């Protein structure tokens, strides 16, 4: 098949299926092999993990924080409900969620990242893998999730929140529950979204329906189990949709 010439005389860029590895630089080919190896490592760890719930949260909260206790309870309740608990594998609230699942006898997975001066992965996982590339790690955190639980956190947690909402909004992944834990913490963000982003026409009311705010561990897990039961999910990993759903119901 011959490409239709562009008016400026340039040929259209070839797609991935038309570009052989031999046609890219050795440096890029070597990088691609590293990325491929990380994906394979992630797929191996996540094999059989469904149904799983990904829990995000600050690495800076220690065991004395009430948020730590709450994340630990959520992890335990999820494990007892039959869900694998997946986190970024670090300390703080990630550790708390892994710890709750681990102590409840459930599967507890940590998907860590190599960072300068970063602490080692927490000790409360049944399986873990450490990635070099953030984007590979992000795929693993999203691909197998039947729900997201977001504890209070910083830039990394906010990054995951808005990227996931965008993926759902644009229909790139199936709709699933996105639950922000702690109205005290997340209330200001919700107010800004309503008073600035929504009022200014930058987002729609449907966009604000893509997530929930809850305060109690029991309620968080009930939302997830009800969603799981109502939708009779068989393929429990997030996959492409033709268009986004309009609501959680």
Image (cartoon, grey):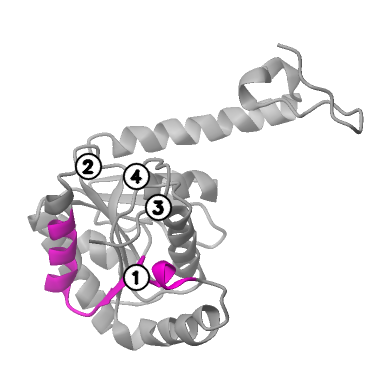
- Quadrant position of residue 212: bottom left
Q: Which is nearer the N-term, disc 2 or disc 3?
A: 2
Q: Which is nearer the N-term, disc 3 or disc 1?
A: 1
Query: Number of marks in the image?
Result: 4
Q: Which is nearer the N-term, disc 4 or disc 1?
A: 1
Nearer the observer: mark 1 or 2; the answer is 2
Residue designated by label 4: 238
Question: Which one is nearer the viewer's eye here, 37 or 144?
Answer: 144
In the picture, the disc for residue 92 is 1
State the SS at label 4: loop
Determine the residue positioned at 12% across, 63% down: 77
Residue 234 in the image, given as x and y percentages of width and height: 19, 38
Q: Which is nearer the N-term, disc 4 or disc 2?
A: 2
CA separation, marks 3 and 1? 33 Å
- For the stretch drawn in magenta, what is the main secondary structure? helix
How packed mark 3 is, by other alpha carbons closer than 10 Å (few <14, some 14-19, many 20 or more), is some
CA separation, marks 4 and 2? 11 Å
Nearer the observer: mark 2 or 3; the answer is 3
Residue designated by label 2: 50
Residue 244 in the image, given as x and y percentages of width and height: 40, 52
User: Which residue extends farthest top?
Assistant: 1
Q: Which is nearer the N-term, disc 4 or disc 3?
A: 4
Determine the residue positioned at 30% across, 42% down: 237
Determine the residue positioned at 37% across, 34% down: 43
Nearer the observer: mark 4 or 3; the answer is 3
Stretch of the chain drawn in magenta = 204-227
CA separation, marks 4 and 3? 12 Å
């Amino acid at each position: 098949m011959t490409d239709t010439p562009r008016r400026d005389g340039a040929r259209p860029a070839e797609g991935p299926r038309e570009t052989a590895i031999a046609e890219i630089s050795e440096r890029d080919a070597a990088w691609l092999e590293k990325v491929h190896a990380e994906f394979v490592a992630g797929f191996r760890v996540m094999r059989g993990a469904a149904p799983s719930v990904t829990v995000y949260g600050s690495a800076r909260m220690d065991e004395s924080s009430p948020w730590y206790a709450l994340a630990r309870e959520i992890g335990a309740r999820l494990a007892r409900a039959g869900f694998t608990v997946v986190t970024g594998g670090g300390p703080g609230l990630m550790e708390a969620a892994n710890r709750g699942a681990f102590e409840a006898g459930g599967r507890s997975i940590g998907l860590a990242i190599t960072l300068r001066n970063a602490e080692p992965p927490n000790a409360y996982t049944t399986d873990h893998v450490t990635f070099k590339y953030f984007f590979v790690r992000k795929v693993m955190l999203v691909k197998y999730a039947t729900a997201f639980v977001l504890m209070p956190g910083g830039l990394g947690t906010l990054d995951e929140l808005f990227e996931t909402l965008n993926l759902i909004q644009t229909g790139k992944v199936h709709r699933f529950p996105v639950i922000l834990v702690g109205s005290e913490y997340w209330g200001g963000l919700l107010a800004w979204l309503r008073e600035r982003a929504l009022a200014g026409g930058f987002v729609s009311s449907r966009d604000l329906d893509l997530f929930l705010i809850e305060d109690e561990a029991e309620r968080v897990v009930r939302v997830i189990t009800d969603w799981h039961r109502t939708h009779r999910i068989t393929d429990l990993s997030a996959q492409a949709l033709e268009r986004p759903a309009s609501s959680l119901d």
